[in-house]
Amino acid sequence: MSRFPRFAGAFALAAAMMVLGGCATAIKPHETTGAPMLDFQSMALNPGNGGELVKADALQPGDIILTAENGLNSVGIRLITLSPVSHAAIYMGNGQIAEAVGSGIRIRGIDAVLADEATVVAFRHPDLTAGQAVQINTFVASHEGQKYNYLGVMLQAPFALERRMCELPLVPSTVRDFCIRGIAAVQLGLGRNDQFFCSQFILEAYRSAGLPLTDADPRLINPGDLLHMREGDVPSVMIHKPLRYVGHLKAAPLMAVAEPLGQ
C-alpha cells in the first residue's frame, strides 16, 4: 500500500485526525494513575520492546516483509491505519524481494530495502512449504512489471476511516470481521483483480500457492492488517493461521507512544 501517489500523502494527513478519534489496537492502564491509555507501542514489536534484530540471512522464501520510511506518504498511511508500518513486500530468496509500487510490480535487493526504509520487520507463515514458496515466486515472476492498483489504493483512504467503527475495543472478532467486510463491499466495490497495491499483492501471491492468509477480499487488507495477523495480536479480519515473528532487520528508535485517553 505504501508508495501512494504523492497527492495521497496530503489527504492522509488531513484524514489522520479523524481516524485518531477512533479505535486503539490496545488499551492499557497507566502504570501509576490507572487511567486508560492508547498503547501503540505494542503494535510496533520494536527490538526495544520485546522484539529482536536479525540479519537478512535469517529470511526464508515466502517471508512477509513490512516496512516504514520517514517520508510524508508513509507517515500519512501509518496515521490513517494506526500502524507502525506502511508497506509490504515478499522475500523471494537469494537476497531479493518483490513488491507492488507506483511503477508496478518490481523485484529488488533486500540491501536496497534496508538502505531506503526506517523500519523493516519480517514475518513467516508457519505452514508454508518449499513447494509453495516456489509457487509464490512463480506468481511474482508472472506479474513482474504489471501496473499498480491506483484505484484500489485511493479507495483505501475513505475505507480506512469507515472501518474504524468496526474496530472499537471489545468488539468480538466475528462481528469485527463481518462489519469490515460489509463496509468493504460498499466502499471498495468490485474493482479489478489484475492490478495490485502492496498488501493486496502479498495476499494474492499466497492465495496462488494454495495457502490463503484469510478469506477476506485482498483489496481490503492494508500493511497494518498484515502486522495484526501475527501471533499474539488481534487480527482485523478472520485469518487461517497467525504469522510468526522472524525479527527486525532494521528498527527505528524506540519512542514514547502511549497517550492518555480523553486528553
Image: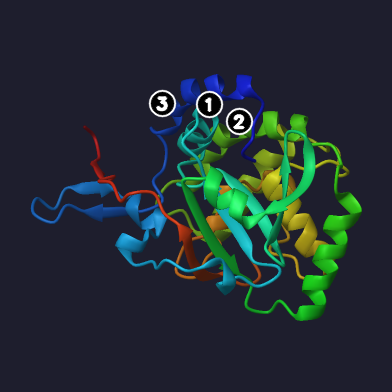
Name the residue: 69% across, 40% down: 184
Name the residue: 37% across, 58% down: 46
Secondary element under disc 3, as helix, strand or loop, is helix
Secondary element under disc 1, as helix, strand or loop, is helix
Q: Which mark is residue 17?
A: 3
Disc 2 and disc 3 in contact, CB within 8 angstroms = no
Secondary element under disc 2, as helix, strand or loop, is helix
Image coordinates of residue 87 in percent, x first then y, are: 59, 45
Q: Name the residue under label 2.
A: 157
Q: Relative to 259, is 219 on the left or the right?
A: right
Q: Which mark is residue 12?
A: 1
Q: How crowded is mark 3: few (under 14 residues within 10 Å), some or many (20 or more)?
A: few
Front residue of this view, candidates 2 and 234: 2
Marks 3 and 1: which is nearer the front? 1
Name the residue type under label 1. Ala
Image coordinates of residue 119 in percent, x first then y, are: 47, 50
Image coordinates of residue 164 in percent, x first then y, are: 50, 39
Name the residue type under label 3. Met
State the separation of the CA atoms marked 3 and 1: 9 Å
**Which image quarter is the N terminus in?**
top right
Name the residue type under label 2. Ala
Marks 2 and 1: which is nearer the front? 1
